[in-house]
Amino acid sequence: MRVTNETKNNVGTRAHRGIVLLVTLVLLVVLSMLGYTLSVRLASRRHRDHYIIDYQAARYGCDSAMKYALAILEEIEDLKLIARSNEPDFSDLFYYSESEYNEYLADWAAKRTFDEDINLPDTNDINDVNDFNDVDILESALGVIDVNEPNSSTVRGPYGPSWPFVVEPVELKIGSATVKIEIEDENAKYPLGWAMLEEGEVKREAEAALETFCEWMGMGSREIDLLKRQLEQMSEIKPFKLDFKPIKKKAPIDTSARRSRRGRRSGRTARYKTTTVSAAQQIARQRADFAKLFHGSIIDTESLARPTIVSESRKESTLKYMGMWASRQVNINTAPRHVLEAAFTFGGDAGRIAEVIIQRRRITPFKDIDDLRKSVFRYSSSIEKCEKYITTVSRFFTIRVTAISGVAKASAIIAVTKDGGKIERIGIISS
């Protein structure tokens, strides 16, 4: 079989065309990949630039809102407590499951004592919220509770807003950022530093107070032991104290550069300057140190922040009720039951005293510790032992600001002490 030149030329032409086609396909694939890569990088760059712009707007909104919140808190001379005798109480909400919470509100509504001039059926004959025919009267009785949407309601706290807020959370727009401001009462929470007290018998009582608090919060024995070990590790770095006294310190003064009248250097003379460190200065230093320690890596805050109850109206966790800024006292007018019981563990009769306080403060808040003694005179000796752990006026607050602009979010928490119109900053966490 003979292969002519024409046949060879045809085969060569087809092979050449195939190679050209293959090269063209490769080039097209390469160009498409380059185009895709370029478009991805451009999109990523645009996204990154847009995020930077959004974050700058969120950061600016967060910083501006923090300054605004500090100014507002400074202008408030005295945070006023409200009477809540005709409303459900916040003291035990941390412990209720959602079904128990709804049952509590229904029971409270059924047992509610109304003014004599309001014509309502006998409360002993009421078994359920639905037994009321006049929804308007029931809503006025429940105040902030919406009968039609119980899950969207909140029980008012000692200041009016839900616990632990001292004012209603504020939402506002700053530029393109949506900002939320929340101010919390830190004296209404369990001071974590109590668990690190080491003076003799107080140490045992401090351990009992911690266990009381943790058991109320539903923590297991392993979780409690882990927290204890973490606090022991922290106390090795710096012990926590409640009692401070002024201390004097001597600092050497360098006199080596002095010259005598004849122009010669005089010999070195040991001279000292005595300075006094006040109790207030020591307390401020301890606050700053423990603000860093409590928010460092020693304590597992993620497990403490794990939600125990989540609904439309409530979000509960151990961390929500725990003072993490080196507060030293609990406000008996604003603390929930388990925090009160932890405070009075240092004196005894904790459960009974806590119950009396809860019932009394709903009508009239305590003016001072003497007022508490008069109201609970049967337990005056227990109260005396607990005086340094309790107060009737909150001076310790945290301000939480969250700003969102587009896809970016900025937040900050600052802890402050407030004495009249004077605000002193303790620490800040920014992210």
Image (cartoon, rainbow, N blue to C red):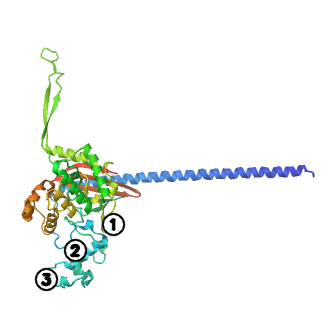
Q: Is residue 31 visible?
A: yes
Decide if residue 244 is on the left or right side of residue 129. Answer: left
In primary-sequence order, the first of circles 2 and 1 is 2
When the figure is inspected, residue 119 is found, relative to residue 58, above or below; the finding is below
Give the labeled residue for mark 2: 143
Against 278, residue 356 (above or below) is below
How would you rate the neighbour count of disc 1 (Cα within 10 Å): few for under 14, some for 14-19, many for 20 or more?
Answer: few
Tell me the kind of residue under disc 1: Val
Question: Residue 219 versus residue 339: which sits nearer the camera?
Answer: 219
The total number of labels drawn is 3
Which residue is tagged 3? Answer: 117
Secondary structure of the residue carrying tag 3 is loop
Q: Residue at x 18, y 58 (%)?
A: 343
| Tag 3–tag 2 contact (CB < 8 Å) | no
Cα separation, mark 3 vs mark 2, equals: 18 Å
Of the residues shown, which amino acid type is indicated by label 2? Answer: Gly
Residue nearest the viewer, comparing 68 with 339: 339
Residue 410 located left or right of residue 103:
right
Of the pair 377 and 246, the residue shown nearer to us: 377
The residue mark sitting in front, 2 or 1, is 1
- Which structural element holds mark 1? strand
Give coordinates of residue 319: x percent, y percent. Answer: 29, 58
The residue tagged 1 is: 310
**Amino acid type of disc 3?**
Asp
| Circle 2 SS class | loop
Residue drawn 27% across the image and 82% down it: 130
Q: Is residue 378 left or right of residue 198?
A: left
